[in-house]
Image (spheres, rainbow, N blue to C red):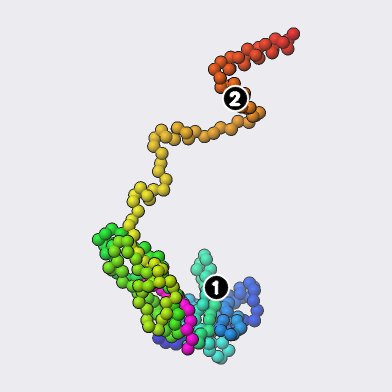
Amino acid sequence: MAEIVVAAENRTETGKNVNRRLRTRGLIPGVLYGAKREAVPLAVSPKEITSILRSKTGENTLFDLEIGGSRRRVILKEFQVEPIKGLLIHADFYEVALDKPIEVKVHIEVTGTPVGVKTQGGLLDHVTREVEVSCLPADIPEKISIDVSELEMGKAVRVGDLKVPDKVTMLSAADLVIVHVVAPRAEEEVAAVVAPAEGEAAAGAEPEVIKKGKPVEEGDAKAAAAPGAEKDAKEKDKKADKKDKK
């Protein structure tokens, strides 16, 4: 692979206005970190960093940052993307030593169609797409491939089943599931809410009507519900009217 060199400028000022001015020049802010080194604010071309991200080695690509005539061998540590347009807006770089191991995440590539899908009606569920490994910078795998052609229904491929190069140490837990073949949900389990049968909505589904006015005491409510209560109430009202006229 050809050596990659990205030009970078030292950045002495920070803030939103400074970053805005950088972007008008076609640059984005970045920071260079390193073991036992102070962080160095930088400005780089987002096009060059995006090109690296889209390469086969992606985030794990080793390249040089050229700053003021000197070069630093780095790897892209973190980056930020504008959520609406998906444009790169910030990048962090980590300076590596070629003779010291580093910890990185490597993409898992799944190949083949499981027998559990082909002949047993199952579904392939890809649970873990990256694993963490430790190795020298020059030994970072481009990807880790697994063939799932023999995977049966109810079976899984775990991190412990992966084959990695001798110079690579797996850091992710061995029992972590990468992929497994699962049975499709039964039709009745997929429907989260079942519509009520005709006539069920009327029984017990009547909305409560709240009326304004004086609350009804428990005794009054019982009296009002008793047979003939309405007739007795009318007779009492008539007697009260006669008394008022006298």
What is the x, y in percent for residue 120? 26, 59
Image position of 211 with respect to 173: above or below: above
Q: Amino acid at mark 2?
A: Ala
Q: Which mark is residue 89?
A: 1
Looking at the picture, tell me which residue is in the foreground, 62 or 190. Answer: 190
Say which residue appears at 62% left-offset and 23% top-offset. 220
Tell me the amino acid under the disc marked 1. Ile
The C terminus lies in quadrant:
top right
Residue 155 forms part of the magenta stretch = no
Question: For the magenta stretch, what is the residue range?
Answer: 99-109
The front one of 178 and 28 is 178
Q: Upstream in the sequence, badge 2 or badge 1?
A: 1
Q: Which mark is residue 160?
A: none
Instruction: Give the SS element for disc 1.
Output: strand
**Closer to us: 54 or 39:** 39
108 drawn magenta: yes
Could you tell me which residue is drawn at 64 percent across and 81 percent down?
Answer: 12
- Marks 2,1: beta carbons within 8 A: no
| Image quadrant where one finds the N terminus | bottom left
Q: Can see residue 188?
A: yes
Q: Can the viewer see residue 57?
A: no
Side of 46 relative to 237 (left or right):
left
Magenta stretch, overall SS: strand
Instruction: Write down the residue under mark 2.
Output: 221
Left or right of 148: which side holds 208?
Answer: right
* Secondary structure under the numbered disc 2 in the rendered image: helix
